[in-house]
Image: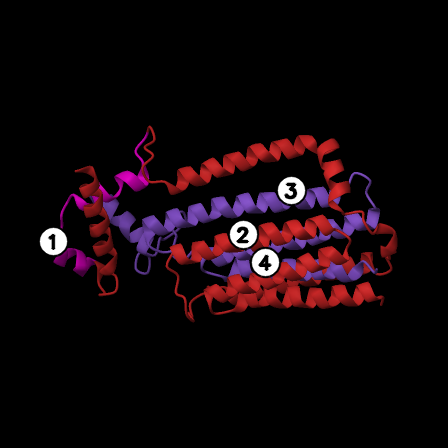
Chain colours: A red, B purple
Amino acid sequence: MTAADVVIVLLGVVAVGSGVLVVATRQLVHAALWLVVSFGALAGSYLVLTAEFVAWVQVLIYVGAVVVLLLFGIMLTRAPIGRSEDLDSGNRIVALVVAVATAAVLVTTLVRGFRSAYVPIKDRVGSGSSHTLGGSLFQTWVLPFEALSVLLLAALIGAIVLSRTDIRGAGPEPEEEDPAPRRRPAAPRGVVARRLGTAKRRTGPDDEDTIVLSRVDEEI
Amino acid sequence: MHLVYPVVIAALLFAVGVYGVLARRNAILVLMSVELMLNAVNLNLVVFDMRWADRLHGGQMLTLFVIVLAAAEVGIGLALVLLIYRNRRTVDIDRLRTLAEGDPDPDSDVGSMTDDEGVRR
C-alpha cells in the first residue's frame, strides 16, 4: 500500500461511515449534517485522485448548495427537529437484504476485475486542474455543456412553476381549486371532527381554515 | 495507486444509498440517499478517468455534468416534496398511496382520506 492508498482508504472509511449514519440516524437534521461529512470526504478523495477541479466543484455545489437546499426542505416541511422514531419504513429488513446483496455483487465483481490494477499516480498529477478541464470543456464538450444549460433553465422554471401557487393554468389548478370545493359542503365542525376521529387530526382542517381565510382576505 | 480501493468504496457507498432509498420513509431522506448513490457514481467516473488518462477528460467532464444534474434533480425534487407537503400535510412516502394499486388502506392514510371525501361529494 502506498501513501495514496492509505489516504484514500481512510477517506473512504469516513465517507462510507458517515453515509451509513445518514441512512441510519434517527434525527433528520443530523442526517443532512452527516451528508456534509460524507461529501467532504469524497471531495478529499477526488483530490487524492488528481481531480482538483472536480473536488472544489463538489465542495461548492454539494456541500454548499445541495445540503443547504435539503436543510431548507427539512425546515419547510416542518419535520421533527429532535429524535423521531418513525423515520424507517416497515420494509427495513428487505431493504437491508437488497443493499447487502448489491454490495456483495458489486464488490465481488470489482475486486475480481481490478485486483491487480495499478496506476502510477505521479504521472497523472495536474491532469485535473482547472486549466486542462476548462480547455477540454470549451473545446470538446461544449455542446453537452450548452445542452446542460438548457436543462438547468428547464429545471429552474419547473421548480418555480411547482412552488408558486398563484399561477393559473388553462385547466383546473389542483392546489388552487382544491380547498374551495372541499370546503363548500360546510359540514359542521363536529362532523368533520368525528370523521377525522382523533384530536390530533383536528389540527389539519384548522390550518386549512386559516389558509382559506387568509386567501379570501387577499381576494377582498 | 491500486484501483481496487476507491472502486470498492464507491460500491459500498452505492449500496448504502440503495438501503436509504428503500428503507427511509421521509421523502427528503430518500433524496439524500439518491445523492449518496450519485456520488458513488461520480467517484467511479473520476477513478476511471485517472486510470485511462483520457485526453478529452471524459470522466471528469461527466462527473461535472452529473453534479449539475444532481443539483437540478434536488431542486425539482424538493419543489415536488414541498408541493406534496402543502397539499397533504405529510411527506411520509408510506402514507402517500394514492397511486398504489389494490386497496388504498383508508384508515391510516391522510392523503386517500381527503380523496375519499372529494369523491363522496
Say what secondary structure mark 1 lies in.
loop
Q: Which residue position holds label 1?
A: A188
Amino acid type of disc 4? Answer: Val
> At 50% from the left edge and 66% from the top edge, which residue is drawn?
A30
Residue span colored magenta: A171-195
Which chain is mark 4 on?
Answer: B
Q: Is residue A76 magenta?
A: no
Q: CA distance from mark 1 to mark 3?
A: 55 Å
Label 4 CA crowd tier, 10 Å (few <14, some 14–19, many 20+): many
- Give the SS element for disc 4: helix
Gap in angstroms between the C-alphas marked 1 and 4: 47 Å
Q: Residue at the far front: name it.
A: A131
Q: Quadrant of residue B56?
A: top right
The reply to whether dot 3 and dot 2 touch (C-beta < 8 Å) is no
- Three-letter amino acid code at disc 3? Phe
Seen at 37% across and 59% down, the residue is A78
Measured Cα–Cα span from mark 2 to mark 1: 45 Å
Which residue corresponds to mark 3? Answer: B65
Between marks 2 and 4 in the image, the one whose residue lies nearer the viewer: 2
Q: Are dots 2 and 1 on a single chain?
A: yes
Secondary structure beneath label 3: helix
Q: Which mark is residue A66?
A: 2
User: What residue sits right under mark 4 in the picture?
Assistant: B18
Amino acid type indicated by mark 2? Val
